[in-house]
Amino acid sequence: MKRATTLANAETMRKIRFLGVVAIVASLSGSAAFALDPMGPPAARVPEGWFSIGFDFSHSETDIDLIDGRWVENDDGVIKAGSAFDLTIKDFEVNKLYGSVGYGFMENWEAFLKVGATAAEFGDSIWNDSEDFESNSQFGIGGGVRATFYEAFKFKIGGLFQVNWSEFDGKLDAAHWPAPDSLDVNLTQMQIALGVSYMLRDWVWVYGGPFAHYIKGDLEDIYTDFELTWDIDEGPIYGGFIGAEMKVARDLFFNVEYQHSSDADAFGAGLMFRF
């Protein structure tokens, strides 16, 4: 009995050390992606008829191309309009924190919904005049499905589809400006992934595969009677992802993953409890 207890305690300590290493990597890892949401294992995570609840966090940083710009000005009742130059916002940083719920609606199929808060910031990009933008905390929502297509021994082959929407509004301002601009950014993103999961140990799965990423949205900049609007339209952006999921306790799982596309890298992490 004493030996069994000792072995169990040693196994628990290995899991805690593994989780600690993952947490350290998470805290040291930067993200250079366009707010890519964590995907998790590309397979159903809950059995049919089960529910799950959890949290997902992501931090990202990227350059955003603004295209097809338009401007409108109300000059003492005279409306003027024209085309605006394309430009790139440098180092657009986004933080997202989601609460999530999932349900195994049929064998090997799971649907999930994410709801949470988002925030963004960037500087010195639109007017190149030492201006800064910091959004208010905003509402974000996402959801999708994941499925297991084939399972044998220690392998699972599956896929994932998810879409999310987020909005960032706030003030674009500089210390020497008489008044700030009002800025609003709307983004809709979609990810499609296929992948393989492998049971490395009875409490650790590793997973990975290819994915495609699509982004659509717009940015609006308003100063008194002058308004500028640009479109955001990118994709498909192809990439790959790799991650690990660890069973922390009975029905409690922690996962961490890395995503790489043709022009970005991303880090994500999440905690999930199923019942």
Image: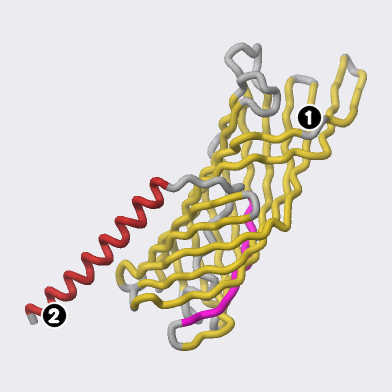
Name the residue carrying label 2: 4
Per the model, the C-alpha gap separating discs 2 and 1 is 69 Å
Q: Which residue is drawn at 56% across and 55% down?
A: 37
Is 123 placed left or right of 17 in the picture?
A: right
| Image quadrant where residue 4 sits | bottom left
Nearest to N terminus: mark 2 or mark 1: 2
The quadrant in which residue 250 appears is bottom left
> Vertical placement of 152 versus 183: above or below?
below
Q: What residue type is labelled 1?
A: Leu
Mark 1 lies on residue: 228
Out of 223 and 230, give the one closest to the viewer. Answer: 230
- Residue 150 in the image: state x and y as whole percent: 56, 85
Residue for point 57% across, 72% down: 195
Spot occupied by residue 189 in the image (x, y as percentages of width and height): 66, 54
> Is residue 93 magenta-colored?
no
Residue 6, disc: none
Percent coordinates x, y for residue 171 in the rendering: 62, 27
Residue type, label 2: Ala
Q: Secondary structure under badge 1?
A: strand
- Residue that extends furthest to the front in the rendered view of this protein: 262
Between 29 and 145, the one lying in front of the other is 29
Q: Please state the extent of the stretch shown in magenta in the rendering.
A: 155-165
